[in-house]
Image (cartoon, grey):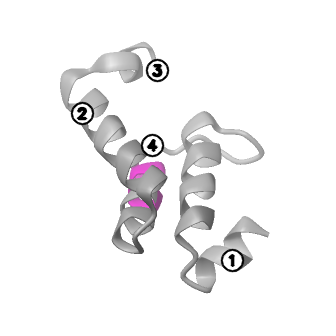
């Protein structure tokens, strides 16, 4: 359902898809795709998507939680 909603430019759906993709919950974990989904969510005006995009980008740049992966 998230994918269907995202295809209709729903920012919250993109944020939720990003979260699932980042964790590999029900799909293959793909950090690049998750970051793209967060970015799209932010571009569509979703506040949580904006927050998560910035957080993930910061964590990726610093190594953060992704160093262990």
Spot occupied by residue 10 in the image (x, y as percentages of width and height): 58, 76
Residue 2 occupies which quadrant of the picture?
bottom right
The residue at which mark 1 appears reads as 5
Say which label, 1 or 3, has the lower sequence index.
1
For the residue pair 2 and 48, the one nearer the viewer reads as 48
Q: Nearer the viewer, mark 3 or mark 2?
A: 2
Is residue 50 visible to us here? yes
Q: Position of residue 65 (x, y in %)?
A: 40, 18
Packing grade of label 1 (10 A; few <14, some 14-19, many >=20) is few
Residue named by callout 3:
69
Give how far apart the Cα atoms at labels 3 and 2 are. Answer: 16 Å
* Alpha carbon distance from label 3 to label 4: 10 Å
* Above or below: residue 18 compared with residue 68: below
The x and y percentages for residue 39 are 36, 61
Could you give the CA–CA distance between mark 4 and mark 2, rounded to whole angstroms? 13 Å
Distance from Cα at disc 2 to Cα at disc 1? 27 Å
Apparent side of residue 16 relative to residue 58 in the rendered image (left or right): right
Residues marked 3 and 4 touching at CB (< 8 Å): yes
List the residue tagged with mark 2: 58
Q: Is residue 40 left or right of residue 27?
A: left
Q: Nearer the viewer, residue 41 or 27?
A: 41
State which region is magenta.
32-37
Labels 2 & 1 near each other (Cβ < 8 A): no
| Cα gap from disc 1 to disc 3, whole angstroms | 30 Å
Residue 33 can be seen, yes or no = no
Mark 4 highlights which residue? 31
Packing grade of label 4 (10 A; few <14, some 14-19, many >=20) is: some
Name which of mark 1 and mark 4 comes first in the sequence.
1
**Whether label 3 touches label 2, CB < 8 Å:** no
- Main SS, magenta region, reads helix
| Numbered disc 3: secondary structure | loop
């Amino acid at each position: 359902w998230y994918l269907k909603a995202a295809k209709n430019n729903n920012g919250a759906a993109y944020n939720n898809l990003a979260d699932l993709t980042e964790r590999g919950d029900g799909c293959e974990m793909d950090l690049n795709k998750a970051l793209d989904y967060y970015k799209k969510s932010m571009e569509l005006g979703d506040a949580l998507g904006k927050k998560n995009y910035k957080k993930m980008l910061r964590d990726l740049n610093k190594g953060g939680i992704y160093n262990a992966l």
